[in-house]
Image (spheres, helix red, strand yellow):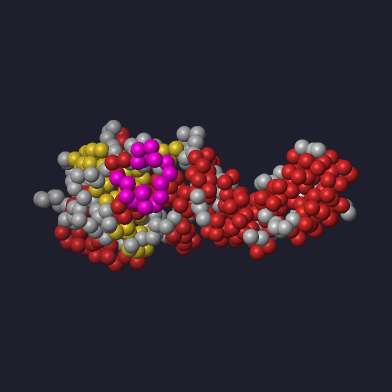
Amino acid sequence: MSTSIPSVVRTRFAPSPTGYLHLGGARTALFSWAFARHHGGVFVLRIEDTDLERSTPEAVQAILDGMQWLGMEPDEGPFYQMQRMDRYREVIDQMLREGTAYHCYSSPEEVEAMREAARAQGRKPRYDGTWRPEPGKTLPPVPADRKPVVRFRSPLDGVTSWDDVVKGPITFDNSELDDLVIARPDGTPTYNFCVVVDDLDMKITHVLRGDDHINNTPRQINILRALGGEPPRYGHLPMILGPDGEKLSKRHGAVSVMEYDKQGYLPEAMVNYLARLGWSHGDDELFSREQLIEWFDTRNLSKSAAQWDPKKLNWVNAYYIKHSDDADLASRVEPRIRELGGDPQAADLPSIMALLKDRAETLNQLAEGAMLFCAPPIEVDAELAAQHLTPESLSVLADFAEHARALPTWDTPGLAALIQDTLARHGIKMPKLGIPLRLATTGRKQTPAIDAVLALLGRETVLERLDAVQKR
Ligand code: GLU
């Protein structure tokens, strides 16, 4: 899409609502969205729901949720193909009138026999043109009681080419393309036809989609031209592979975008990570949504397949968590703490985020970390207690508690100093105090920096727990 960009760029994302919004779909949407935004254009959302057996309202909702979560709001739409049936019928009638489409009364068995015959002669299986009108040709008599399909009168020779935005020039021999069925016997339009009518009516200038659609493109271009339209620019994105080099699938973990929300990924991180799957801007790995829009150029779309890398996603997510505002993180983690059975109100959540965010890869890890402050302490493991809560260490803890009660202010520096003083007073090293102190106040052997943990737990709670440990 380098040379001539039309004055108004219009892109679309056209998912079939047969399941959740998967990672590949989200990436396609993201590129179409970023391209439109870069050019100050229009991003259209179109739901291709004509496959009644496989489309569900839940899947539509999952797509809308996923797009909203990732912040890819459409400027126009969602349009639903099922609501455009009258328009498709109108165009089919127009094509029949203009002679660019025709009724075909061959039965499915007859068409299969034609294909078989072609195969037997070593040719590509195809419809043999029995019902295709030609000047001077007499068509067979119309069979009674049989409803026809409508076929597109595809060019017989020549080539159909386009300069693919991702893959470069692609050419198909028209002799390879069958006279495509564009309406079934009951009048319902077929997939490739609806796409063409929509792309034309919605004035789409650029189509970015998965390269599994390459074989559809020459058919769509020919129908578009028959309708007097100018084909959009097409760009076909290579697929996403799993870490093992196989096509990305459930085997590799979550493939639904919203599952990543559940697991505690930030939408900003997801957008950043998805953008790098098949697109690059120099060596930049971390960039904002605004930078993506500013930098997005289809020339930097990769011709080869991208590889899903969960470790890198975690690294990107950790970066976004680390650089998030504490209060913002707190509000995102709050519902997750509730889900774990904790009480987010029980503690100063933003300060907890400040303490934990440098080491968390997901919001769920933050929530788990915050449970230290949002739930009663866990029961100390008996073996750990026997090892670390000895009469000797309990007397150190009692001394610590006495001084803690008298601290003029309850904060991290004050507690850090008290810990050092206690070590000195008893002539012991940190683990001798650190482990019993952690066990007594949190039930855990390992926690973030204990001075900061105690500061956040608050004086009253800490003293209560230090008191309780003496009585266990
Ligand atoms: N509905 C198609 C799909 O979900 C996409 C069609 C297109 O982008 O042209 O794969």
Question: Residue 160: x, y in percent?
Answer: 20, 42
**Horizontal arrangement in the rendering, residue 335 relative to residue 41 (left or right):** right
Q: Nearer the viewer, residue 119 or 371?
A: 371
Highlighted magenta segment, given as a residue range: 280-297
**Horizontal arrangement in the rendering, residue 400 relative to residue 218 (left or right):** right
Identify whether 389 is placed above or below 184: above
Place residue 122 in its image quadrant: top left
**Horizontal arrangement in the rendering, residue 8 relative to residue 465 (left or right):** left
Farthest residue to the top: give it: 122
Residue drawn at x 70%, y 57% as measured from the top left: 410
Residue drawn at x 23%, y 41% as measured from the top left: 163
Identify whether 81 is placed above or below 472: below
Judge whether residue 52 can be spotted in this image. yes
261 within the magenta span:
no
Farthest residue to the left: give it: 136
Judge whether residue 274 can be spotted in this image. no
**Horizontal arrangement in the rendering, residue 345 relative to residue 153 (left or right):** right
Question: Residue 355: x, y in percent?
Answer: 61, 50
Question: Residue 372: x, y in percent?
Answer: 69, 53
Place residue 429 in its image quadrant: top right
Q: Nearer the viewer, residue 453 or 96?
A: 453
296 within the magenta span:
yes
Residue drawn at x 43%, y 47% as measured from the top left: 272
Question: Residue 7: x, y in percent?
Answer: 20, 56
